[in-house]
Amino acid sequence: MSEATDYSRDTDSLDNCDVEAAYARWAPIYDLTFSAVFRPGRRALAAAASKADGPILDVGVGTGLELPMFEPHTQVYGVDLSEHMLRRAAQRVTREGLGHVAGLSKMDATRMAFADASFACVCAPYVLTVVPEPEAMLDELARVVRPGGEIILVNHVSRKDDPLAVLDTWLDRHVAPRLGWRPQFPWSIIGDWIDGRPEMQLVERRLLAPFGLFTITRIQRLPIVQAESREAAPQEMEYA
């Protein structure tokens, strides 16, 4: 599942202090700047998550742009590292009467205060490129999702055939801390993580509008029996 890449991660290029500082700056203009370009991904994520039979966790809820997109019957909890973004999410919940939002909390996505297997679905829209240690975040998402449940990611994934690949590399090396996210993000980070977790299985991976800039990834946490079977005879899943 891994793909060849020239990606080389600078582990000092981004930390939580950078992220919090950046999103304190972004918060007042975030909706105006990013609402339109991120909307297709948020809609796809919310539509898939709304099919879950149980509570949903929205990791990196930000200003809550996707919260109105979840179906009214759902029960959604949102967490984010930025208090500035969470305040705006809370205002949105009140302003739009989003009764399906059960709570909003400040949390680090790599160390959340939820019990194991708490959620039927865990969503992370545009978050993996923000956290300094994406594998640690994936481990935490896997911890809090129930067997049989799903992790749903939406993210920019770098591709060698992408005309923006050179720009991604330059931004990653020079301005990632000021942006608050890592522009260069190869599929191998997600793919290698799935390969190393026998209880996880890729369900869907597809490009989204606009222009295939973003990818939706759905990963199922298998029931114990299926996970044991996959560990005994691992198979790669093809995607369109």
Image: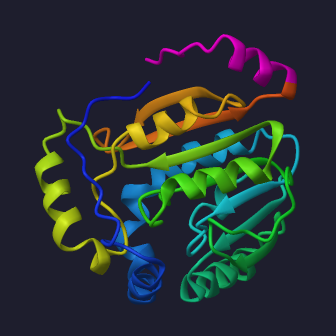
Residue 189 falls left or right of residue 111? left
Residue 219 falls left or right of residue 134? right
**Colour scheme of the picture:** rainbow
Residue 221 falls left or right of residue 236? right
Q: Residue at x 84, y 28 (%)?
A: 223
Instruction: Classify 87 as above or below 76.
Output: below
In x, y percent, where is residue 151? Answer: 66, 43
In x, y percent, where is residue 126? Answer: 47, 57
When asked about the image quadrant of residue 227, the answer is top right
Q: Residue at x 70, y 47 (%)?
A: 142
Can residue 188 be seen?
A: yes
Can residue 71 be seen?
A: no
Question: Which of the two residues, 69 or 137, is positioned nearer the viewer here?
Answer: 137
Residue 137 falls left or right of residue 5? right
Q: Which quadrant would the C terminus be assigned to in this image?
A: top left
When asked about the image quadrant of residue 94, the answer is bottom right
Total count of labels: 0
Q: Which quadrant would the N terminus be assigned to in this image?
A: top left
Instruction: Classify 237 as above or below 8.
Output: above
Residue range of the region highlighted in magenta in the rendering: 225-240
In x, y percent, where is residue 123? Answer: 64, 52
* Residue 237 belongs to magenta span: yes
* Residue 107 belongs to magenta span: no
When asked about the image quadrant of residue 176, the answer is bottom left
Question: Which of the two residues, 32 or 84, is positioned nearer the viewer here?
Answer: 84
Question: Which of the two residues, 104 or 159, is positioned nearer the viewer here?
Answer: 159
In x, y percent, where is residue 173? Answer: 19, 66
Q: Residue at x 48, y 79 (%)?
A: 16
Q: Residue at x 63, y 73 (%)?
A: 108
